[in-house]
Image: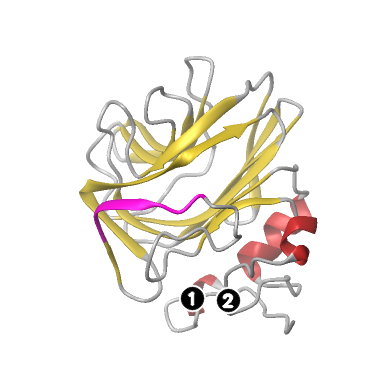
């Protein structure tokens, strides 16, 4: 297997996005599901969590959610130890209170872009009926890498490879939908390279995904 580097944010649009091969190597990485979202919502990890799209389009490198779309996936149980990683590009930061990244279609457990006030939009891990927000904020039409790492209930939010908020006492939940939640808080923007892992990745791993500083075991198929 040839190892590829994760493209730097400024080069992603021009580069072919890598995705996980369904192989033993991926299982050793504790991959639960991985959607590269370049041309479809298939689970490239081989985990069987293929998506069913409604009003989602693809341009060969990313998925576009126009504020009316969603991707339904088979239910994934998430414990109190996991990692979520994705690239997000919001269309604007002036409307909507919540924009769903991934959540449960029947509850409000999940990961969102949250606008608490004005044009301030933050990464949000919503659990136990409460927001848990990043200190860093999204900029409109700007590709941003976000990660949520949960280790036995201890949460660290990451924004472009840098820790941006810590919380405690996270609970287990389930995930079943990308781009929309039960309250129609639909995503308006783009997603690419979204992955869920069953372990808590360290800060060096998150940073390497953001800046491509170390080779990652992601390969083209």
Q: Residue at x 76, y 72 (%)?
A: 214
Was residue 171 drawn as part of the magenta stretch in this picture?
no
Q: Is residue 156 above or below residue 71?
A: above
Was residue 52 drawn as part of the magenta stretch in this picture?
yes
Between 13 and 141, the residue placed more toward the observer is 13
Residue 159 pos. (x, y %): 57, 50
Q: Which numbered disc, 1 or 2, marks the residue that appears first in the sequence?
A: 2
The N terminus: image quadrant: bottom right
Residue 179 pos. (x, y %): 34, 44
Which contiguous range is marked in magenta? 49-56
Residue 79, quarter of the rendered image: top right
Q: Which residue is mark 2?
A: 7
Q: Is residue 139 above or below residue 26?
A: above
Identify the secondary structure beneath mark 2: loop
Q: Residue at x 53, y 15 (%)?
A: 128
Q: Which residue is mark 1?
A: 12
């Amino acid at each position: 297997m040839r190892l590829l580097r994760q493209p730097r944010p400024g080069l992603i649009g021009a580069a072919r996005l890598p995705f996980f091969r369904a192989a033993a190597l991926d299982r050793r990485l504790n991959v639960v599901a991985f959607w590269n979202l370049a041309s479809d919502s298939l689970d490239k990890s081989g985990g069987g969590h293929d998506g069913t799209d409604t009003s989602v389009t693809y341009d060969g490198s990313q998925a576009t959610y126009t504020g009316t779309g969603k991707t339904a996936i088979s239910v994934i149980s998430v414990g109190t130890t996991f990692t979520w990683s994705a690239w997000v590009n919001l269309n604007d930061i002036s409307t909507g209170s919540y924009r769903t990244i991934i959540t449960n279609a029947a509850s409000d457990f999940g990961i969102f872009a949250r606008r608490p006030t004005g044009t301030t939009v933050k990464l949000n891990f919503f659990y136990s009926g409460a927001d848990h927000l990043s200190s860093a904020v999204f900029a409109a039409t700007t590709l941003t890498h976000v990660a949520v790492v949960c280790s036995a209930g201890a949460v660290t939010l990451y924004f472009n490879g840098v820790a941006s908020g810590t919380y405690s006492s996270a609970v287990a939940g389930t995930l079943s939908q990308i781009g929309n939640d039960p309250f129609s808080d639909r995503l308006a923007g783009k997603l690419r390279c979204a992955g869920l892992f069953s372990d808590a990745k360290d800060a060096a791993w998150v940073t390497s995904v953001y800046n491509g500083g170390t080779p990652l075991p992601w390969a083209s198929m």
